[in-house]
Image (cartoon, rainbow, N blue to C red):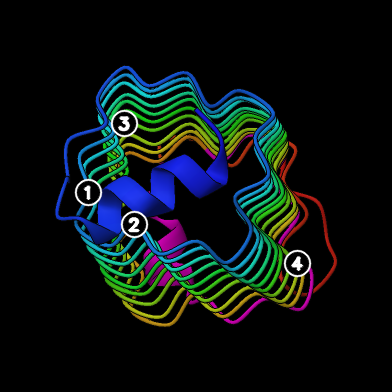
Amino acid sequence: MDKQELVAQYTAGKRDFSKANLRDADLHEINLRGAKLLQAHLSGANLLRADLGGADLMGAKLTGANLREADLSDTNLYSVDLSQADLRGADLRRATLNGANLNEANMSGANLIGAKLIGATLDRADLSETDLRWANVRKANLIGANLQGAKLGEADMRRTDMRWSNQRQADLIGADLRGAKLGGADLSKANLNNVKLGKADMVGVVLEGATVTDEQLAQATSLKGAVLPDGTRSE
């Protein structure tokens, strides 16, 4: 199926394109708002600035797809494969990404306000300057992810694995990091006002210049080898 046929069927009223094979298809700026694309094969597809708002892509394969500046707001992306996908500047507000594979995806500047990423894997993903306020990122893996300058205010990140992540200058005001793994993470100049750190593992974390209180740090399981806000190293 090519873009012309897909657009013709959508215009005629068809909405169910489940399991469609659209691998490497050029679908830039296509309007498939509210369509069903369950388990569709879209790996390598060009979906630049596509409108997929409210669509159902559960289980779809989007490996390496170009979704730059696409509208994915309120979209069901449960258990999709978005590894190495380009999602720069995409609108993912309130999207469901539970269990999704976003390893090495480029999500720089994306809008993820209120998105659900429970149990998702985002290892080595680029989330720099993304907006994750009020997002649910519980039990997700962000090992080695780049979150520099990201907005994480009020995000639920309980038991999230963020070891060796880059969170320099990130805004985490009011985020819940209880039970999170932060070993080796760089939180230099990050804002951790009102962040919950109960039982968080902060071994070797870098907090130089970060906004955080001693009372907050006392909640952590361990700060062994951590670089504290004043630049000294914890024993």
Quarter where residue 175 is shown: bottom left
Marks 3 and 1, how far apart in space? 29 Å
Q: In the image, residue 165 lies at what x, y percent?
A: 70, 43
- In the rendered structure, find residue 35 and report the number of the disc placed on it: 1
Marks 4 and 2, how far apart in space? 37 Å
Residue linked to disc 2: 32
Q: Residue at x 59, y 50 (%)?
A: 27
* Crowdedness near tag 4: few (<14), some (14–19) or many (≥20) residues, C-alpha within 10 Å: many
Q: Secondary structure at mark 2?
A: loop
- In the rendered structure, find residue 168 and report the number of the disc placed on it: 4
| Magenta span main SS | loop
User: Mark 1 and mark 3 in contact (Cβ < 8 Å)?
Assistant: no
User: Which span is picked out in magenta?
Assistant: 202-220
Decide which of 21, 60 is in the foreground and name it: 21
Magenta stretch: includes residue 16: no
Q: How many marks are shown on the rendered structure?
A: 4
Mark 1 vs mark 4: which is more N-terminal?
A: 1
